[in-house]
Amino acid sequence: MEMAPIQDSRAAERTTILEMRGISQIFPGVKALDGVNISLHPGEVTALIGENGAGKSTLVKILTGIYLPSDGEIFIDGKPVSFASAQDAVDAGVTAIHQETVLFDELSVAENIFLGHAPRTRFGLIDWKTMNARAAELLHVLESEIDPTIRLKDLSIAQRHLVAIARALSVEARIVIMDEPTAALSRKEIDDLFRIVEGLKRQGKAILFISHKFDEVYEIAENFVVFRDGRAVGSGRLAETPQDTIVRMMVGRDVSNIFPKVEVAIGETVLSVENYCHPTEYRDISFELKRGEILGVYGLVGAGRSEICQALFGVTLPSSGRLVLEGQTVSIRSPRDAIAAGIVYVPEERGRHGLALPMSIFQNMSLPSLARTSRSGFLKAANELALARKYAERLDLRAAALSVPVGTLSGGNQQKVVIGKWLATLPKVIILDEPTKGIDIGSKAAVHGFISELAAEGLSIIMVSSELPEILGVSDRVLVMREGLSAGIFERSQLSAETLVRAATGNA
Amino acid sequence: MKKLLKHRELLLVGIIAIMVAGFATRAPGFATPGNLANIFNDTSILIILALGQMTVILTKSIDLSVAANLAFTGMAVAMMDAAYPGMPLALLVILAVGIGAVLGAINGTLVWWLRIPPIVVTLGTLTIYRGMAFVLSGGAWVNSHQMTPDFLNFPRLPVLGMPLLSWMAIGIVLLMWVVLTRTQFGRATYASGGNPTAAVYAGIDTGRTKFLAFTLSGALAGLAGYLWVSRYAVAYVDVAAGFELDTVAACVIGGISIAGGIGSVAGAVLGALFLGVIKNALPVIGISPFAQMAISGIVIVAAVVFNARAERRAGRIILRDRGAKEVSA
C-alpha cells in the first residue's frame, strides 16, 4: 500500500490508445475496483497481475462493456467513451479472448468466427463465399491453415483456441484483451500463441495480457500493472522491475495483523488423506489434520483445491488414495457418506450449491440432518424447528420467522443459514471453500472469529482460500497447491506471503 | 398483489367460487350441492393424476406418459376381469397399482440411470405404453357387458352420500399431503427441484428421488387406469388420449412451478378442480366443445403467465446475490 508506483521514464514519449482514469466498480457491499488507472500503448503488451479476486476480471468486464463502471472515465485516442453494451466496446475497437472460450461445436470454423457479424449479400442473406474467404485470411494471419468450412468439433483444443483468437480479431480491433489465455495450453501451444501475440504487436495493437504466471509475463509483456484488493498498487516497465518487487506488490505487507489468530490447543490427528489422485484434477495429495487445527489450502484458481475438497466430501471420487478418519479407514462415495462420517463441506457458491431458495430457513437447515430429526422416514417438524432455532441463535441469524423462504434473506443471512445447516450435522471436520468470498471486510472479521471459535470447540477445519491475508491470518498450517500437485505444506512459523505466492506460482 | 401471490391457494378458491356463482346465474341448478359433488366426482381421476404429476414436476421433471400408463393399465385389468371373472376386485386394484408403478419405475430408471431428460423419456414411453395397450388388446374394446358387476360398481358405491370414487380421491389427497409434507422423501422432492446441487451436497440422492417420484406417479396412474375404465365402463386403446396435458395444466394452474421445487398439494387439487368446473360448466351454458378447448387453453396460458411473473419476483434476489459474487470472480 505504501508502495509507490514505479515511474515510467518513457511514458511521455509513447502514444496511448486507451486510458482508464479513476475507474471504480461498486457492487452491493463490496468495492470491486477502487480508482484504477491504466493506459495501453500501441504495439505493447501490458500484463495485468494480481491474486484471485483482485479485480482483474471486473476490469475486463468494464472494458468489454459488460459492466458500466460506477465511477471514472475511459478515453480512446484521448476522446472520452462510454460502453453501454458489449457492442459499444466492439465498435470502439476493444476485443477480448477469454480463458474459457465460448464457441459452438456444431457450427463451422467460419461461422464461429463471424457469428453475429457475418458478411451479408445484397438480399440480407449470409454471404458464405466472402465469409469463408475472410475466415481463411484471418487464420492465415495466425499462421494456421485450418479449413474454415469444417465443423469446430473436429478441431483440437489448441486449434479451437486459434479460432477464438481469429474471432476476436475478426472485428476491427485495436485493443486486444487476453484473459489468462495460456491456462489450458501446453508449452508448445503457448509458444505458438506468443508468436501470434508478437504478430499483433507488430500490427500496432495494444494488448492487455492477464496471467498468473511470471515467466510468461516476463517473456511477452513490456509493461505491468499490479492489482490488489481492487486497487492498482503498482505499474511500470517489466525490464526495470525485478520479480521480487512484483510479488511484494501482489501480496502487500502488513497483512497478518488484520486477522488476529486465536491460539487453540491442537489435539491428536483426526483426518489423514493419503495419496489422493484424480486422472485430471490432482495427484498425490497427502496431508493430516488435527483436532482444533485450521489447515489453510492456498493456490491459484484451477490448482485443484476445490476438487480435492469435493473428493473428501464424496461429490467426486478420487481414482486412488486412502482416507483415515480417527484411525479408521473410511470410504466416502457420496456426500451422504461424508455427512454420516462427520465431514462436511461449505461450498463456495452459496446460491448455487448451498441453498434451495424457495424452501424455508428451517427446511434448509435441517436438510442434511433429516436422518437425525426424523423418525422412520417421517419428518418431525418440532425437531427441525428446534435444530434451526439453536443454530439461528448461535449465528445471530436475523429473520422474521424460521418459516420464511431463504430467498427473501440478505446475502449475509443466507451465508449464516448455510453455515448453520452444516454445523447442525455435528461434524468432526468442516471444509470451508472461500468462506469470505464476496463479503465486506467487516463481516470477514466476524467469519474469521467464528472459524477460530469452531476450532476452539475441537472441530478440525480445512479452509480453502485465495486471499493471502486470510490464509496467513487464520491457518495453523498451509497446504499450497499448484497445477494439481502439492507444492508444500508450511507450518505457521514458516508462513510468509512471499513463500506462499512463490510456491503457488512456481517461482522457487 | 404480493399478499395475494402468497396465498395463491386462497386466490384459486376465490376464483373457483366466483366462476361457480357466475355459471349459476346462467344455469340455475349449477351451484347445488348435488351438482358440485358431481363435479368433484368427475374431477377425481384428474386430481389423482395431477398429484402424481405434481410430485414429478417438483423434482424438476415431467411425466408425459401418465395417460398412456392409465390406458395400458386400464386395458390390462379390464381384460383380466373379462377373462377371469372370479378374480377378486381387491387383487385387480392391487395389480393396477402395481402395473402402473412398474411402468412408472421404467420411466424413473431411464431418467436415473441413463440420465435421459424426463421429457424425452416420457414422450417415448407415452407412445410405447399406448402401443403396448394396442398389442395387448389387438385393438379390440372391452365393453361393459364383459366386465363383472363388482368391477363396474365399486367406484360408484355410495358412502356417506358420495360415491367411493370421490372418497378415494380425498384419501389420495390426504396421503399425498402426508407424503410431501411429512416424509423425508417429500422433503427430498422439494429440495431436488428447488436446488439440485444443494440437494446433492446435503446428501440427497436426487436421481433416486426422481425415480421414486416417477414410480409414485406411475402407481397413481395405474390406480386411475382401473377407476377410469370402471367409471366409463369401457376400455380401448385411446382411453384418456391427451389427458397427460390436463394433469400438467392442473399443476400449472395450481401454482406448481415447472422449474421444480415450488407447489402444494392444495394447489394441484384446486388446479384440477378449476379445470373440472370449466369442463362441466361450459356445456351447461351452451358453449360448443371446440370453444371449450380454446377456453381451457387460454386459462392455462394465463396461469403460466401469472406463474412466470410470480417466479420472476423470487428470482431477483438470486441476481443480486450473483452481482455480489461476480466481484471476486
Image (cartoon, coloured by chain):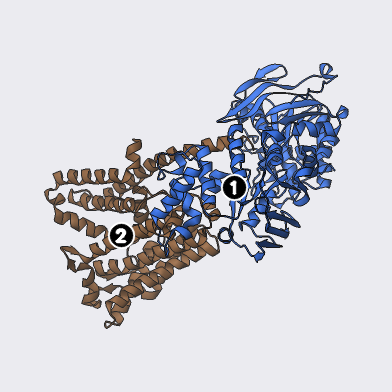
Chain colours: A blue, B brown
Say what secondary structure mark 2 lies in. Answer: helix
- Which residue is most to the left? B28
Residue B316, position in %: x, y? 47, 37
Please tell me whether residue A9 is drawn above or below residue A271 in the rendered image: above
- Give residue A97's mark: none
Say what secondary structure mark 1 lies in. Answer: helix
Asked whether residue A79 appears in the rendered view, the answer is: yes
Q: How many C-alpha atoms fall within 10 Å of the one at disc 2: few (<14), some, or many (≥20)?
A: some
Q: Which residue is mark 2?
A: B174
In the rendered view, does A365 fall on the left or right side of A438?
left
Q: Which residue is mark 1?
A: A454
Please tell me whether residue B311 is drawn above or below residue A24 in the rendered image: below
Q: Which quarter of the rendering shows the N terminus of chain A?
A: top right
Would you identify the image quadrant in which residue A23 lies? top right
Kindly indicate whether the residue at mark 1 contacts the one at mark 2 (C-beta within 8 angstroms): no
Residue A377, position in %: x, y? 42, 63
As rendered, which of A11 and B150 lies closer to the eye?
A: A11
- Which residue is most to the front? A265
Residue A157, position in %: x, y? 74, 49
In the rendered view, does B22 fall on the left or right side of B312?
left
- Residues at marks 2 and 1, CA–CA distance in whole angstroms: 44 Å
The three-letter amino acid code for the residue at tag 1 is Leu
The three-letter amino acid code for the residue at tag 2 is Leu
Asked whether residue A144 appears in the rendered view, the answer is: no
Q: Which quarter of the rendering shows the C terminus of chain A?
A: top right
